[in-house]
Amino acid sequence: MDEAQTASAPTQHRQLLSQLSSILHDLEPVQKQLLELYQKKSQALRQVDVKLIDECGTIEAELTRELQFVLLRRQQLLQTAGQQGLPADTLYDLLLKLDAPEAESLFQRIEAAQQRSKKLRHETWVQWIVSTRSYQHYSQVLELIAHAGQKVPTYSRGQNESSTGGVIFDASA
């Protein structure tokens, strides 16, 4: 490394540190808003409040776009760091290498963002499971209604079964 590169390294590190802090500053409120929204959406799913579920979906789409923008900035920061020979795998690794006085508070913010991300993944997964199972149940009920409780021949093992469904859907029972 020549003298000019050595002199510009602290400036470059400060710029990277500033960008990292800005990314965390923008990420935190989006994550918090998503967590609040997912709590509201879970409640709406439990109460089968279709209007509220739809409203949550619209807000979720907007927050997702904001989150994608923040993640794009994160990727660009890590790419820039990699071009400068710094760790480019995670913000945490980059921050370790920058060795700045304010790094401790940034480490805490990164850890908090990681915890929120885990909660968001968990809640998203739970809501996906609930929605998928509800859809499957709804489809099965519609199938029973549409076929008057009779099993559809295409679902049988080749024989023409004529068993009936439950008492609820079979008026002859």
Image: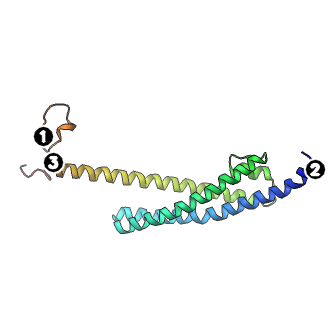
Q: Nearer the viewer, residue 95 or 15?
A: 15
Q: Nearer the viewer, residue 125 or 61?
A: 61
Q: Residue 107: give x, y in percent of width and height.
A: 71, 56
Sequence order check: which comes first, mark 1 or mark 3?
Answer: 3
Q: Nearer the viewer, mark 3 or mark 2?
A: 2
Which residue is found at the position 36% from the left and 68% from the top? 51
Sequence order check: which comes first, mark 1 or mark 2?
Answer: 2
Q: Amino acid at mark 2?
A: Glu
Sequence order check: which comes first, mark 3 or mark 2?
Answer: 2
Q: Residue 94: give x, y in percent of width and height.
A: 74, 50
| CA gap, disc 1 and disc 3 | 12 Å
Residue extending farthest right: 3
Which residue has dot 3 on it?
Answer: 147
**Callout 3–callout 2 Cβ contact below 8 Å:** no
Q: Nearer the viewer, mark 1 or mark 3?
A: 3
Q: Quadrant of residue 108?
A: bottom right
